[in-house]
Image (spheres, coloured by chain):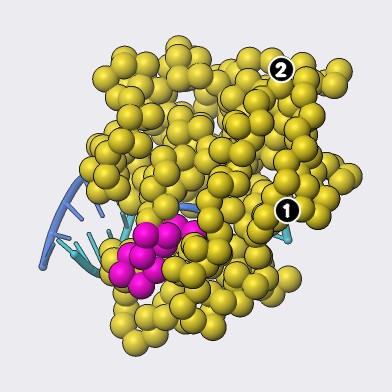
Chain colours: A yellow, B blue, C cyan
Amino acid sequence: MKTHIIPVNKFDLDHTLRCGQVFRWRENKDNWVGILGNSVIKAKQKGDILIAESDLDIGDVISYFRLNDDLDDIYQHINKDEVINEAIAMYDGMRIIKQDPWECLISYVCSRQNRIEKIKKTVSIISKNFGDEIQFENKIFYAFPKPYEIAKANLDDLAKCNFRFGKIQAEEIKRIAKLICKGDFYLERLKELDYESAKEMLMSLGGVGHKVADCVLLFSLDKLEAFPVDVHVRRIVQREYLKDENASDKKIREWAGRYFGRYAGYAQQYLFYYERTKEM
DNA sequence: AGCCAGGTTGCGG
DNA sequence: CCGCAACATGGC
């Protein structure tokens, strides 16, 4: 176990973990506890210091939180109007997290037409029922299962994970896991492709549409131009930006790419978080 | 009770 | 390409 003391600049741990992009972090007292691969990580922020306890290397933590992203530069690209300016002001320091692509893919397949709290529950049950045990501070945590652990899972057992679409989704996830186990689909390799090609590959898996593909690209495959259009993003874009037209999701994605540019994904996450919380 | 949640698919037009 | 219905869980 190591304790990393990491100086940070323009970073806000709470916003980063609360904004709805990750499902495996829990907040207790003044600590966050999350699970990355087969490691538990306990994190807290004090001003410009991030304190992280885990067996991960410091480089893994920095990479995971994208602490090397130049947030000033990103803001310069996306801060183009009053709406997003307010979102950025409110959630200054929120960063896109770099998740594990496999876990990210399955999590977002589970996310469809679902609530974030329920997605968290489902991912947690999947991990508990099929993942490896991890000991951390005398407690037991569970790693997200590897592809082969889902591929070999009994369908009825898998269906007990509280999926939004029950057994249908259990089958879907098992099918995807098998494809990935077979070895002719390397998620990691999608990082080497350009955005469009990587997206096409993801969508060819089946059970993955534009929205989930864009989430996986943005949250795990370094495609910061991906702009996932979900119900909240559609709502805020329609209301604040594309007021006159009845914009299809395709139109919204294309508009976002033109308007926000290569960091459209960052803009998306600020707008998403803002739209869901501004009333609170 | 009814509405809605980080959607995808297959169909007809 | 678009719009539409089916899919079918659970919290408020």
Q: Residue furthest right?
A: A29
Give the mark nearest the N terminus, 2 or 1.
1
Q: Which residue has dot 1 on it?
A: A14
Q: Secondary structure at mark 1?
A: helix
Badge 1 amino acid = Asp
Secondary structure at numbered mark 2: strand
Q: Which residues are magenta?
A: A257-266
Residue positioned 51% across, 32% down in the render: A100
Is residue A1 in view?
yes
Where residue A60 sits, quadrant-wise, is: top right
Residue A230 screen position, x and y as percent: 45, 59
Residue A108: give x, y in percent of width and height. Answer: 48, 42
Q: For residue A74: magenta?
A: no
Q: Are marks 2 and 1 on the same chain?
A: yes
Which of the pair A106/A227 is nearer the observer?
A227
Q: Reply above or below: A91 against A35.
A: below
Q: Who's the residue at 83% across and 50% down the image?
A: A46
- Residue A3, position as x, y percentages in the image: 79, 29
Tell me the residue at 78%/47% (across/down): A49
Q: Residues within 10 Å of mark 2 (few under 14, many from 20)?
A: some
Q: Residues within 10 Å of mark 1 (few under 14, many from 20)?
A: some
Q: Is residue A262 magenta?
A: yes
- Of all residues, the one furthest to the bottom in this rendering is A244
Residue A249 at least partly seen: no
* Residue A167, image x, y percentages: 46, 31
Distance of label 2 from label 1 (alpha carbons): 24 Å
